[in-house]
Amino acid sequence: MAVIETLVKDIYNVLDQNVSHEPDSTLAAAYAMRIGGELAKSTLPRNRPREKGKMWASDLGKQCLRQAWYNFNAPQYGEPLTGQTKFKFLYGNLLEEAVLYLAEEAGHSVTHQQYRVEHTINSDWKISGKIDGLIDGTLMDVKSTSSFGFKRYKDGINASNDSFGYRFQLGYYKGFHAIQPGINDGQGFVWIDKQNGTIKYTPCTVPARTVINAKANDIIVAVDKSEDTDVVRGYTTEPYGKSGNQKLRVGCSYCPYKQRCYRDSNKGKGLRAFLYNQGPIWFTDVAREPKVQEISSGQVA
């Protein structure tokens, strides 16, 4: 019987031309239907307003409570998703389905895909989300990432490198699921390097139920504030080199509300973005003009 420790090797063996394998056409057809669903879903709008009282599992991982405030109270200030960004999300979803298909084709048990986990916080609020699935009884989240991100998690994910709060979402699923029997005590991530086709599995520890509940209640308190400025930002800015310039941290730079949130930066002129080799960098205070091209927010993908 296949075990989670051999997952990556077994997936590669299914694809290796030097290893004999007879594919299961019924299994492939089932995944083709799922992939078709992802393609159709990708064309739907993603700008529907959030309804107070319904929290997503992904909300728990976001470090910034002010972002939660915007999500529920002022979504109109969010940057619209570009076609390029939506294609990136679609690509990630398709890679996830490919890994789960290949895992099952390789003889691993894959169950509870898109199984919904709901938890009532109080009379007004509940949390809801869907797991990627269980592989060999292990709660699993499949993440596609850049080569840089893949190296970031080479030794696994922990509190020091979990910039996007992935462990909180997985911790919610672990702490509040109703899957019995069929789940063991393990959980982890399958990482996919989108550029090089490298895959790895890393087990991890996740926050306890009490920590998840506390974070959910913090979000509720923040959302109930009157103004965005009543909620403390989840990130501080950081210096860029020795220029005296201050920039957004990574978690902040991906936020769709950053321009509204930092509207008072650069002496009231707002954020300024400059294009470096590694991508755009957002500055809150420019003491020395960067020697690279400044770009408008509309040019940033």
Image (tube, grey):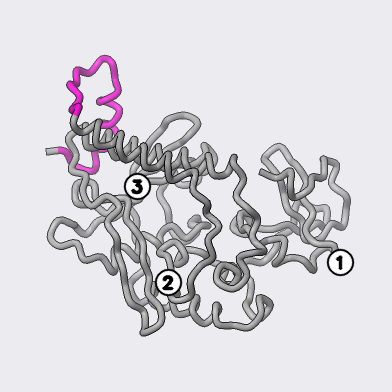
> Residue at 33% of width from left, 43% of height from top?
201
User: 238 left or right of 269?
Assistant: left
Find the distance from the CA under tag 3 to the CA under tag 1: 44 Å
In the rendered structure, which segment of residues is drawn in magenta?
2-25
**Which of the two marks, 2 or 1, is nearer to us in this view?**
2
Element at label 3: strand
Find the distance from the CA under tag 2 to the CA under tag 3: 31 Å
Residue 23 counted in the magenta span: yes
The disc, 3 or 1, on the residue closer to the chain's N-terminal end is 3
Q: Residue 101 carries which label?
A: none
The amino acid marked with disc number 2 is Lys
Residue 267 counted in the magenta span: no
Which residue in the structure is indicated by mark 2? 54
Q: Report crowding for label 2: few under 14, some 14 to 19, many 20 or more residues within 10 A (C-alpha).
A: some
The amino acid marked with disc number 3 is Thr
Which residue in the structure is indicated by mark 1? 267
